[in-house]
Image: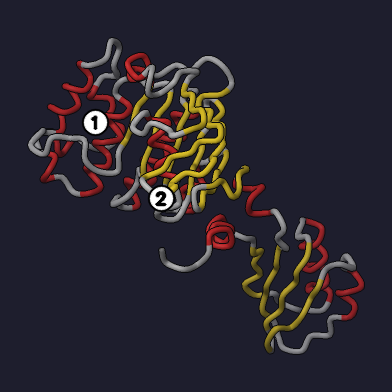
Amino acid sequence: MPQPAAGPTAVEVVDLVKRYGATTAVDGVSLTVPTGSVTAILGPNGAGNTTTVEAAEGYRRPDSGRVRVLGLDPVADARTLRPKVGVMLQEGGIYPTSRTMEALRYHASLYAHPLDPRVLVELLGLGSVLGTPYRRLSGGQQQRLSLALALVGRPELVFLDEPTAGMDPQARLATWAVVEQLRDDGVTVVLTTHLMDEAERLADQVVVVDRGRVVAAGTPAELTSAGAENTVTFHARAHLELAELRRALDPVTVIEEVSPGSYRLRGTVDPQLLATVTAWCAAHDVMPQGLTVDRRSLEDVFLELTGRQIR
């Protein structure tokens, strides 16, 4: 499999600005992608995340700022970078009449030390469509072929644009497994996706871009825990006497009966709190049904940062 890039940083973007006429699509974005990590760059439509990635891929020339990929300028050093970088586009880039194996073998021929196309066919479940033209593949099959083409050259760094769009659940899980294996092999992955569960599952770090600027960055755990109270909910018989349970809990924990028989605790949820609640229930012959620990999801954070209106 591919070897990792040298150095701790695979992608560095500093004060990137990109304008289209009077519109500033990217307005001073800065971010770094550590070597061997999976970084998800998220944003609403038109937020500037796609333009930022395209600048790193060498498809957009910055108006100002600095972009370095594997230590090189992706525009000026494109010829040197191309053999080291794989790009999976969401759509396009493949001749419509190209057959699956034909496309794989052709792309493999462009590299000095490619992966065996048969390995990718097996890995991505393309064996049943080897002779099928690209235009006749389903959306999910086209995505899997695009991923295979991005990987066939053994890249050190791979850009994945909406990699599981159009895939069924089985193909989606298989693609996630491929991304995780790439990271285990030391390959750097930059991922753009609108699927928050995908980013939360795969990413070592998440960068949220909105209106051309970075509005948040961190690990999924850091973003979902920052400023959030964890919540425990359960159902039991109505109108429980909660005074003794309140005394047993941390003073900052709030417990309330939000509707008859429906209880909610808000505060710092840890194993000790759960043990206290279940022990109190056992001592008072209470069966806590549907006891659930609720935490903010990455989607909750994303909507808080970027708003809920359709753009």
Q: Which amino acid does label 1 sit on?
A: Val
Q: Mark 2 highlights which residue?
A: 23
- The residue drawn where x is 30% and y is 12% is 113
Q: Which amino acid does label 2 sit on?
A: Thr
Q: Mark 1 highlights which residue?
A: 121
Instruction: Tell me: 275 left or right of 53.
Output: right
Residue sitting nearer the eye, 169 or 159: 159
Residue sitting nearer the eye, 72 or 22: 22
| Marked residue nearer the N-terminal end (2 or 1) | 2
Instruction: Tell me: 193 left or right of 308.
Output: left
Which picture quadrant has residue 58?
Answer: top left
Q: Looking at the image, can residue 200 be seen?
A: no
Residue sitting nearer the eye, 179 or 135: 135
x and y percent of residue 251 in the render? Answer: 90, 68
x and y percent of residue 141 in the render? Answer: 22, 43
Screen quadrant of the N terminus: top left
Which picture quadrant has residue 99?
Answer: top left
Report the residue that reaches farthest toward the front.
Answer: 22
User: SS for tag 2?
Assistant: strand
Q: Which colour scheme is used?
A: secondary structure
